[in-house]
Every structure is written in C-alpha cells, then in structure tokens.
Amino acid sequence: MRYGIAQLAPSRFPYPRFALALLLGLAGGYIFSILKLPLPWMLGAMMFCTVAALTRAPVAAPAVIRPPMSAVIGVMLGSGFSPSVIAQIPQWLPTILGLVVFMVACGLTVVWYFRRIGGFDRTTAFFSGMPGGLVEMITYGEERGGDARVIALVHSARILMIVMTLPFAIQWIEGVSLNRAAGSVSMFDTPLVSEAWLVGCGLAGALLGHLLNLPAKTLLGPMLVSACVHLMGWSDFKPPFEIVNAAQLILGVAIGCRFAGTASRTVMRILALSVGSTVILLFWMTVFAVIVSRLSDFGVVTLALAYSPGGLAEMSLIAVALHAEVAFVAAHHIIRVFLVMISAPLAFRIANRLLGPEQRPARQPAE
C-alpha cells in the first residue's frame, strides 16, 4: 500500500503527461461513442493515445493506475454469472462443448499463425492468439515476459474488426436493422448498497488474488468474488456504466501510452497480421456455428453470435435486435472469457514444459 501511494507522489508520477493522455482519451472515447463504434471508451482512448505516443507527444500512463480499473472490469465480468443463467447450462452442453473445441481450434491455429507467419516470440504469439479478453491476455502475457504492446494491438484489432464486420454481415444476411438497446445501469439510479457491493467485491477480490497468488490478481480475484456473490444470490448488482466506462477509459489510455517509442512501421505490420488472424477466427466461427446448429436446437446466426470472439455487450445487443437467445449468447461469451482466463496460464506452462526453451530468437515484429 505504501509503495502504491509513494508512486503517486509528484516527484514520481508524471501528472502533466498523464493529464494530456487522459484528455486525449476522453476525446477519443467521446468521438467513438458518437460514431457508435464498439468499446468506444477503451478503443477510442487507446487509438488517440496510440497516435499521440507514436508521434512522440508528451503522454504517459504509469502502471500504478491500472489495478483499480482491472478490478472494476473483473467485478463486471463476474456479475454476469447469475443463478438464472447457470440453471440453463445443462441444456447448453452440446453448444458449450462446441465452444470448447472452437476455442482450442482458434488457439492452435492463431498461435501458430503469429509464431510462424508473424515471427513473434513464443510468449507473445501464445497470448496474442488466445480467443480471450484484451485486458486479460495483456496482463498474462506481460507477467510472463511477452511484448504487451504487440498483444494489446493484436487483441484490440481483433475486437474492432470482428465487432465492426459481423453485425453488418448479419444485418445484410437477416435483412434486419440492428439498433442499440438501452439497458445499462446508471450510478444515479443504483442504490448505495449496490455501490457497496461493487467496492466490497473489488477489495475482497484483490485481497483474495494476493493471498492465492493468482495470475492477474486484481482482475481474476474480483471476478471470482463477484461471480460467487451473484451465484449465491446475495446480490444481483451490476457495476454502473459510468464506472465501467471510466475503467475502460483509463485502461485504454494506459494501453495506448505503451506505444511510446514504437515505430509506426511496427504498428502497421501488426495490424496487417491481425487482419489475417481475424479471418482465421471468423472461419472457425462459421464452421462451428454450422456444425453445432445441426447437433442442437439453435440456429446458425445465434451460434455465430455466441461463438464470435468479439465483445460481449455488442454481441448481446445484436442478439436483442434479432430476438435471439440473449442469455444464451451472453453466457457463452462469459464462459469463453472465463475459460480462457483460467486455462491460458496452465496451457502456456504445459506448452513450455513440452517444447522446452526456445532454441533460437524469433524474428521481431518490427522487422
């Protein structure tokens, strides 16, 4: 605690540069929100701060600001595990099994793609290729020596490309208009007890993560505590969208500022590689949606939304517009993120034991 507070001292914390980065992040998030782009406050802030960092503007976002924001995201993910959703899981066993195989297929092929075609080192390729959350894979990869800037850009490009292409494809195929649905909870409409649950889950989760020495402790710990609270029926609170947006904004700023000193040629190369990885993901999504639709009672479009490695909120909103199984789509995305968060560190450890240390340095993404 003392160490964290000491990092906020004016002599150690670059307040002017962080203030500029925060202003740019707010501008980016607002513009992305106006344009109705996916994950506006994270991706907008990340894009604006990335451009600023690449042009050597005086921006900075020290690591000390990230843990509280990660805790908010963890609590939000955990809040998706309600008793009503869990009660339906036995009926979804065929589609969940299909999701697990889909994740394995995506992971193996995309990791191979980044390793062999992209020339990434093993750690960076592994966590870049996981079909999981942006924040989670950045945290895991960085803890294990991967290039966090590359992982961040790859996953950001994945989310942006999938969420910005799939809705239009479905709209064209189904012939419907996809309008955003309101349903977010505002902090001005939530009781104080809900705010107390939010803070309590965040603090208890961070402590649990520290005691259990969990990977990404400030993210996974709060997620587990929040999931337990919701599954036990103690509360059905949801983090207010203002707080979630603020957390995404800060994380987007922090991610964007990582690119300070990175050559623009490197960024463009990684973006080009991300197009290829996204094509691979969409291919597997289509294959598994078609196959599983013949083994279950769900249609191809509903399964495509459930399997799509895009954003939970955006895919759920599309499901609402299509009158699809919203709980089904949301649950599969939550399960996907949860399984990746739990299994990725273990799979990486097993892979390292089987493959041994790298025999030669991989080509650098900047080459």
Image (spheres, helix red, strand yellow):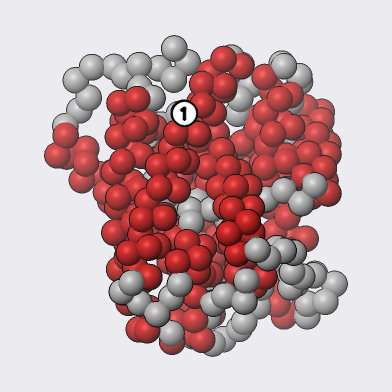
How far across and how far down the image is residue 223, in percent? 51, 64
In screen coordinates, is 330 left or right of 344? Answer: right
Which residue sits at x=37%, y=51%? Answer: 284
Q: Position of residue 267 (x, y in %)?
A: 57, 22
Label 1 Cα crowd, 10 Å radius (few <14 / some 14-19 / many 20+): some
Q: What residue appears at the point 45 percent right and 72 percent down from the top-left corner?
A: 299
What is the quadrant of the C terminus in the image?
top left
* Residue at the far top in the pictured view: 367
Q: Is residue 48 left or right of residue 137?
A: right
Is residue 63 visible in this depiction of the protein?
yes
The residue shown at (35%, 77%) is 296
Q: Is residue 71 above or below residue 328?
A: above
Residue 73 in sight in this render: no
Going by the image, does 185 lie left or right of 317? right
Q: Amino acid at mark 1?
A: Leu
Against 276, is 163 above or below?
below
Q: Quadrant of residue 193?
A: bottom right
- The answer to which quarter of the image holds residue 257 is top right
Picture coordinates of residue 94 (x, y %)? 31, 74
Q: Is residue 349 above or below residue 116?
A: below
Q: Nearer the viewer, residue 32 or 140?
A: 32
- Count of marks placed on residues: 1
Q: Which residue is at the front of the view, 58 or 48? A: 48
Q: Residue at x 47, y 61 (%)?
A: 304
The image quarter containing residue 157 is top right
Q: Secondary structure at mark 1?
A: helix
Q: Nearer the viewer, residue 126 or 231?
A: 126
Residue on which disc 1 sits: 273
- Percent across and percent down for residue 182 are 77, 70
